[in-house]
Amino acid sequence: MLLIKGSYEIVGTQPDGDTVHFRPDKPEEWDFVCGPYRVKRNASGRGKLRLEGIDALETHYSRTGPEVAQPPPLPAKAREELLSWLGFTSVVWGADGKVASTTPASVPGFVLTRGADPSNRCVAFAGLGSHPADSGTHVFVDSALLQSTLNYHLVSEGLVYPLYYGTLFYGLRDELTLAFQQAQAAAKGVWAVDKTLAGATVTGLDSITDVGPTAEDMVLWPKLFRRLVDYLNLGDPDLSGFRAYLDQEADKFLVVSTGQVTTGLDEIVDVSGTTVKMTRPPEDLVFTEG
C-alpha cells in the first residue's frame, strides 16, 4: 500500500468515527494515490480520509434531507475514541458543529492507501508517529502493522461496523473480520445493542434518528441506516416500497460466504410490516466502489 507521512489536523472540520483530515508533509504525494478518483485537498494540502474497512454510526448525515444522526450515545463515543487515540487531548467544538480548537494543533502520523472514493476522500488505514519506510513509497501491510492502526483499534473496541470494498486485500479483510467477530462475541460497543440482523421497528425518521425518543436501543449498520433515511426522505413512511427502492439504488456487492455477486441490497434485506432486518451480516459483504 502507498505510505504517506504527515499530520492529522481537525480544526474547522467535523470528524466522526470513520473520517478525519490529514495533511501530508509533501502534499504532492496525494497525486501518487492510484485509481480513478483523485484526493481533493485545500491550499495547504489538507485532505479528508475515510478509514478503510469500517463504518461508524452517523453523527451528521444529510445526503437527501435535513441533517440527522443515529441515536446517542454510541456515534459520539466512536468519534471521541478516534480523537483520543490520535492524541488530541482537548477538543473545543464551535456552535456550527465544527472543531474550533485542539490541543495539540496537529498530530504526526501516516496513512496507508490504495485509492480514493467517489467523494474524493483518501481511503486509508491510519497510523501514528513515524514509519521506517520513505513517504511516497509502497510498503507491505502485515498483521502487526494492521493491528497498530486506528482502524483496527476501533474495530477491537466494538465502536464501528464492517464496510468492505473490493480494493481491500482479502487477507487484511479476513483479519478485520476476525477482530469484528471477537468484539461481537464480547458484546462490545455497538454489538451489545445492534438490531441489524434481529430486526428494527421503523415507523418514520424519528424512530431511527437522534430526533426521536428511542435513544440508544436503535442501533443499525450505518449503510442500512443511510438507505432508510434516504427512502423516508421521499415523504412516505410506508415500508412496502423499501425493497424496491434498494433495488433502484443498485449497490453492487459480493456475498463472501456464497460467492454470489449481486446488485441491490433488496437481495439481503427483509421487510415485514414495520420491521426491517438484514439476512446477511455486514462482514459477509464486499462492495464495488462507485
Image (cartoon, rainbow, N blue to C red):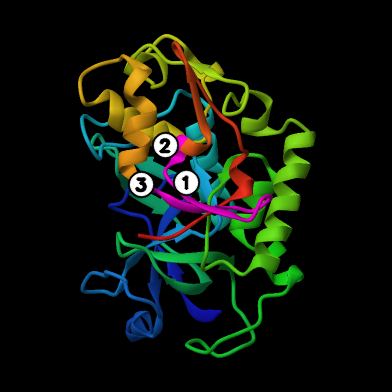
Relative to 36, residue 201 above or below? above
Residue 148 highlighted magenta (yes or no): no
Report, in whole angstroms, how far the alpha carbon at label 1 lies from the one at label 2. 22 Å
Give the percent coordinates (x, y) of residue 157: 68, 42
Q: Earlier in the sequence, mark 2 or mark 3?
A: 2
Query: Which numbered tag is attached to residue 58?
Result: 2
Under tag 1, what secondary structure? strand
Residue type at mark 1 is Ser
Residue 211 visible, this orientation: no
Residue at horizontal 71%, vertical 59%?
Answer: 174
Query: Which numbered tag is attached to residue 203?
Result: none
Residue type at mark 3 is Ala
Residue at horizontal 51%, vertical 70%?
Answer: 108
Magenta residues, as a range?
A: 251-266
Residue type at mark 2 is Glu
Give the percent coordinates (x, y) of residue 179: 73, 50
Q: Dot 1 corresponds to which residue?
A: 90
Relative to 54, residue 231 above or below? above
Relative to 136, residue 165 above or below? above
Q: Dot 3 corresponds to which residue?
A: 250
**2 and 3 marks in contact (CB < 8 Å):** no
Residue closer to the observer: 206 or 228: 228
Residue 276 visible, this orientation: yes
